[in-house]
Image (cartoon, grey):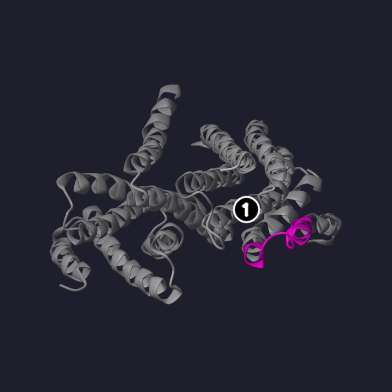
């Protein structure tokens, strides 16, 4: 089977899209963006393949320095479209960006695991944690920042570009560690960022409620 | 291996360790400053200016994490483009946005009365190209171009930073609140530009010097943010 990514994409996205009409508005939005995340995965896979072949770069260099940039730009496009044409509400943008990131990582993880014939259950679990947490968090940071940067036209463009840069650098750090089989270090960094965001989301707001 | 070669190898190895140590210093300082900065500003009704300054520190820290991981796992930074340039670009873009996007239009309507401040600020951005000119012959032209591109937002940011340092308060208390922060950011941009060259040239003394200064300026950025935030409240 050539281009297994398309087989898997249609197997997952068609049921999701069929059920969209039956869902409530909020759930529909999230499921739609999970499917969109898968589309971004396919687009970035195609662009990465094209760039890798045309630039004739080594795999290590490409994975650590080029693919994080293309992936982060493409993943941010649906979030950006949502922010520009649908809504700039912070909660909604956070939900959308997480959904896009999760959709992207689901398809990417399945493709990686099915492509590796020797993959064990442990590999799949580890991949689920690192890839899932990683893509979810990288897009979340862009989406969360976009809810600030998107509030004014004057800093929308520079703010968005700077955010893409930040998430691309984070993505590159993650890819470098994973490339060299330092899965635990990659996971540790992601967990630290995850806990920090959790603290901001729940810890700070709880403290504020107490002081009020 | 002859003793001289061994000694040379040990020397290079120590230099390598020193470089990793300095990146680690910048990473730790950046991470602590970022967390502290977020704690100062998060959820408070203050100008987005401070948000962008803290975001710049975050982007800078990410770049150091990339450098540390790359040096430890690969030994050297890739020749030519590497994603560390994007961290510099992002950091300087955040610093530019802090002034351009949030306060520039509020205090300066483009009228003649403020023309002298705009003119006086013009030399400030030229220091960044001067740094480029003084270093470009030491490193390969390819790297020089990447560093130049990465620091382009810094050229524009330097103009606004300097302008808002010399700008009169004119009944805008926030101009006073951001003055300290602008002062530190201006030197941060210059130091970061020199650091980018020191990183490529392997001039360990210059690297040591710029790293220590950058670490100090990162602390200064967040400290001045704290002061600015206090002034903002009053």
Magenta-highlighted stretch: main secondary structure? Answer: helix
Picture coordinates of residue A30, whole percent (x, y):
26, 55
Picture coordinates of residue A163, whole percent (x, y):
49, 54
x 74%, y 63%: residue: B137
Chain letter for the residue marked with disc 1 in the picture: B
Front one among A189 and B184: A189
The image quadrant that residue B125 belongs to is bottom right
Q: Is residue A152 visible?
A: no
Give, as a single range, the part of the protein colored magenta. Answer: B127-144
Taking the magenta stretch, the answer to whether it contains residue B133 is yes
Q: Residues within 10 Å of mark 1 (few under 14, many from 20)?
A: many
x 68%, y 40%: residue: B208
Whether residue A49 is situated above or below residue B126 in the rendered picture: below
The residue beneath circle 1 is B92
- As drawn, the residue found furthest toward the front would be B2
Front one among A87 and B186: B186
The image quadrant that residue B126 belongs to is bottom right
Front one among B202 and B27: B202
x 26%, y 63%: residue: A38
Q: Is the C terminus of chain B in the top left, top right, bottom left or bottom right quadrant? A: top right
Whether residue B131 is situated above or below residue B66 in the rendered picture: below
Would residue B52 be found to the left or right of residue B165 on screen? Answer: left
Picture coordinates of residue A109, whole percent (x, y):
24, 55
Taking the magenta stretch, the answer to whether it contains residue B21 is no
Q: Secondary structure at mark 1?
A: helix
Picture coordinates of residue B86, whole percent (x, y):
54, 57
Front one among A59 and B164: A59
- As drawn, the residue found furthest toward the bottom would be A54
């Amino acid at each position: 089977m050539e281009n297994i990514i398309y087989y898997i994409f249609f197997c997952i996205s068609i049921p999701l899209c069929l059920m969209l009409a039956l869902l409530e508005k909020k759930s529909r939005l999230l499921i739609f963006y999970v499917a969109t995340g898968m589309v971004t995965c396919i687009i970035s896979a195609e662009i990465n393949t094209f760039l890798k072949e045309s630039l004739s770069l080594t795999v290590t260099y490409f994975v650590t320095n080029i693919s994080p940039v293309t992936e982060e730009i493409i993943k941010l496009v649906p979030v950006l479209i949502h922010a520009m044409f649908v809504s700039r509400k912070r909660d909604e943008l956070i939900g959308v960006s997480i959904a896009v990131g999760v959709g992207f990582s689901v398809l990417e993880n399945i493709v990686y695991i099915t492509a590796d014939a020797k993959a064990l259950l442990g590999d799949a679990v580890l991949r689920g944690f690192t890839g899932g947490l990683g893509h979810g968090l990288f897009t979340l940071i862009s989406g969360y920042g976009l809810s600030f940067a998107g509030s004014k036209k004057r800093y929308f463009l520079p703010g968005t570009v700077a955010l893409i840069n930040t998430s691309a650098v984070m993505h590159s750090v993650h890819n470098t560690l994973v490339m060299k089989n330092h899965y635990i270090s990659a996971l540790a960094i992601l967990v630290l960022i995850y806990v920090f965001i959790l603290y901001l989301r729940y810890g700070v707001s709880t403290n504020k409620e107490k002081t009020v | 291996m002859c003793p001289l070669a061994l000694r040379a190898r040990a020397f290079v190895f120590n230099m390598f360790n020193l470089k990793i140590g300095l990146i680690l210093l910048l990473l730790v300082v950046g991470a602590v400053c970022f967390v502290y900065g977020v704690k100062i500003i998060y959820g408070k009704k203050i100008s987005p200016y401070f948000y962008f300054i803290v975001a710049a520190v975050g982007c800078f820290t990410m770049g150091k994490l990339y450098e540390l991981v790359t040096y430890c796992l690969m030994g050297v930074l890739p020749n030519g483009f590497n994603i560390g340039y994007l961290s510099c670009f992002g950091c300087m873009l955040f610093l530019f946005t802090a002034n351009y996007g949030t306060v520039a239009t509020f205090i300066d309507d483009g009228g003649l009365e403020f023309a002298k401040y705009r003119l006086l600020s013009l030399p400030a951005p030229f220091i960044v190209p001067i740094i480029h000119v003084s270093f470009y012959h030491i490193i390969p032209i390819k790297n020089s171009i990447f560093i130049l591109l990465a620091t382009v937002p810094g050229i524009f940011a330097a103009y606004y930073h300097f302008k808002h340092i010399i700008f009169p308060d004119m009944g805008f208390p926030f101009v006073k609140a951001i003055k300290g922060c602008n002062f530190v950011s201006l030197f941060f941009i210059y130091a970061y530009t020199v650091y980018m060259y020191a990183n490529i040239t392997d001039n360990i003394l210059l690297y040591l010097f710029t790293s220590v200064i950058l670490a100090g300026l990162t602390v200064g950025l967040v400290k001045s943010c704290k002061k600015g935030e206090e002034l903002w409240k009053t």
